[in-house]
Image (cartoon, rainbow, N blue to C red):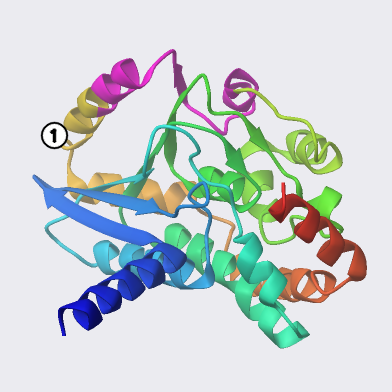
Amino acid sequence: TLFTTFALKIKLMNINNHLGSLYTKIDNQLATITFGHPNANSFPSELLKRLAKEIDTLSQNEAVSIILLQSEGERAFCAGASFDELLAITNEAEGTSFFEGFAHLFLAMRRCKKLIIGRVQGKAVGGGVGLVAALDYVFATESASIKLSELSLGIGPFVIAPVILRKAGQAALNELFMAPNQWKNAYWAQQKGLFARVFENLKDMDKEIDDFIATLLKSNPLALSEMKRITWQHTDHWEKELLDNAAISGKLVLSEQTRLMLEKLKNK
């Protein structure tokens, strides 16, 4: 019936909203990936897997020289891990599997043969900061503040830590890790190397991104690929380290303190 068909469509929409969205557009050697989720562009495990797989696919696509990664909307860039999914974890295996999603995403970005440029239009938290750190070059607006909130939840940014350490250094990692309730502004992130360029508004940022990518696309694709490889040297150990660290987070997320804090934040 018409009602049944309509109800099915609504159900599918709800499922898609729960899993998030991921779209890729390829035009003139540029692949633009846009991810989204109703909860401040947070990451459920399925979206993490899809994004990692898409980056692997584009890495092998000879029609692509540059990747631009962005999120939906004009507010949050990425709220990190999905609180709903974290609360649904019932054992260490499930917890480890969830955090391995971030590990596999960062590893996909690491081995990708194409430069990945980031467009960060708003705040990034937790895994979202790790995503920023794993990008090769990042444009951001002044509203793109960052923080690592994991310690306040009774866990730690174990999968994210090596990625931030590589990009911003030990002092910046310590400051983010030990101040889980403190937002760091976009200029702080730029000073630490997490952002390359910061703009007052989206219009100015997008114009500069277009010009920047147009210039890069005039370069030899093989030269870009070789530079990508060189800038990611000395990270081979991540293949094991990130997965080991995911197991630590997978265990800690089951603690009573973490469950209470997640519930409290979810109900805000």
Is residue 112 shown left or right of residue 183? left
Q: Is residue 110 above or below residue 87?
A: above
Label 1, residues with CA under 10 Å away: few <14, some 14-19, many ≥20: few
Direction left: furthest residue = 28
What is the three-letter code of the residue carrying label 1?
A: Lys
Residue 192, percent across and down? 64, 28
Q: Position of residue 216 (x, y in %)?
A: 22, 34
Residue 261, placed above or below residue 178? below
Residue drawn at 82 percent across, 74 percent down: 254
Q: Residue at 82% of width from left, 55% of height from top? A: 153
Q: Is residue 222 above or below residue 242?
A: above
| Residue bounds of the magenta highlight | 186-209
* Quarter where residue 263 is shown: bottom right
Q: Position of residue 225 (x, y in %)?
A: 30, 51
Furthest toward the top, the residue is 200
Q: Quadrant of residue 154?
A: bottom right
Front-most of residues 227 and 178? 178
Q: Closer to the camera, 221 or 53?
A: 53
Front residue of 158/36: it is 36
SS state under label 1 = loop
Query: What x and y, as percent, mark residue 168?
Result: 65, 36
Q: Say which quadrant the N terminus sits in.
A: bottom left
Label total for image: 1
Q: Where 247 sits versus 23, above or below?
A: below
Q: Residue at x 28, y 45 (%)?
A: 224
In-image side of 160 versus 122 (left or right)? right
Whether residue 86 is visible? yes
Asked whether residue 237 appears in the rendered view, the answer is no
Residue 196 drawn in magenta: yes
Is 61 a magenta residue?
A: no
Residue linked to disc 1: 218
